Amino acid sequence: MRIKLVLLSLLFFGTAKAQLQPFDAWIQECNLDSLKQQVKNLTGVDTVLINGIKQTIGSRYMDQPGNAKAASYLKAELERFGYTTNTQSFSALGQNIIAKKTGSLYPDKAFFLTAHYDAIAVPFSLAIGADDNASGCAAVLEMARILQDKTLPYTVYFAFFDEEEQGLIGSEAYAGSFDFQGTEVQAVLNLDMIANDRNNDRVMELHARPYGNSLELAEKIQKLNDSFDIGLTIEIRNPGTTASDHSSFWDQGVTAILFIEDAQDFNPYYHTRFDSIQYFNDSFFLQNTQLALASLGWFGGQADSRLSTETALDLKVKFFPNPTQGLVYMELPQNGSISVYDAQGKHVQTETVTEGNSPLNLHAYQAGLYFVVYTTESGQSSSKRLILQP
């Protein structure tokens, strides 16, 4: 279970059998209004349609009516996006909601996008849990929406776990019963509390431990943030916390990562009735969702999905200014070549470049998004997004 980064799949994610959309377009499809609406629906700000009846979800504490309503709502949303769902009942009240998108090339190798949907506060009747963890649920739903019409070589599971607040009960039940022999799990991306950033410093954390390739995956995700200019500052925590559902997969020896907000700027309304959407940092919420989608797309969108210790993203390459009106200056560590692709993945230019400072002239092209792929003479590659202004 090692993931090899193949740079040009960033542009095409294509194979002879499956051509996939240019990856950056996936990130741009993340919609803040859609994310926030899901949070409003899950926290009772707005009513939702469940089994044909308008209802308010409200508290999602394990024994409150809103918890079961949330499970039904998540199931209905996944089915609205075209997925077949499965409900795993693991106790008198506990329900995990799972949807599966079967891979086109490797149906028996899978990635997981996960979040817990239950909440806790005192009094239990007011446990609306906007940040913890309607935010993670909304992000997984948004990714399910975006991926519904995409073709991926690997299988993707969208999993919503219950009773996380009681000690990871739902995810432990699921991971304990999952057929890891029949399905090779490549990685689990768990989202838990991703919308609070009071000081607006854009710092988030990736939690990893030496299970599977978790540490290596965290490092690669950190570099993806820079490569795609998502705009977060990422801190890797090792040993990472075991206080969320990714830990249930660590117990099985599986590669798993937790996406979570900065512990030094943690939500002051955590586990209280005041954990509401009014305290969200909207752009931070969107960026965390984009990072998770970037991670899933990068690793799960490739035919060869093994982690490597040396990859294209380790190259120290600088492009400036960005955005540009046509002329870009590059600081390159070695001789090599530069190839330019437009947002649809069409190759528009290739030229030889030398070590040091080199100019790149894009005046001939229309304004828009471009990918610049730098390849060294030794075969290493790195990619940057460039925005060409009028």
Image (cartoon, rainbow, N blue to C red):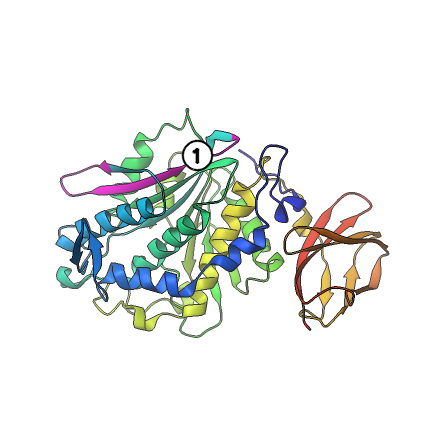
Q: Quadrant of residue 125?
A: bottom left
Residue 60 is at least partly visible in this image: yes
The percent position of residue 120, horizontal first and vertical second, equals 21, 58
Residue drawn 37% across the image and 66% down it: 266
Disc 1 crowd, CA 10 A, few/some/many (<14, 14-19, 20+): some
Left or right position of 173 against 280: left
The image shows residue 127 at horizontal and vertical percentages of 20, 61
Residue 388 percent coordinates (x, y)? 68, 67
x and y, in percent, of residue 358 in the image: 83, 63
Instruction: Give the side of residue 204 with respect to residue 319, left or right.
Output: left
Q: Is residue 30 above or below residue 109?
A: below
Question: Is residue 108 within the magenta segment?
Answer: no
Query: Above or below — where is 267 with respect to 237?
Result: below
Which part of the image, by quadrant, shows the C terminus?
bottom right
In this view of the protein, which residue sits in the foreground, 43 or 23?
23
State which region is magenta. Answer: 88-105
Q: Amino acid at mark 1?
A: Thr
Q: Which residue is mark 1?
A: 102
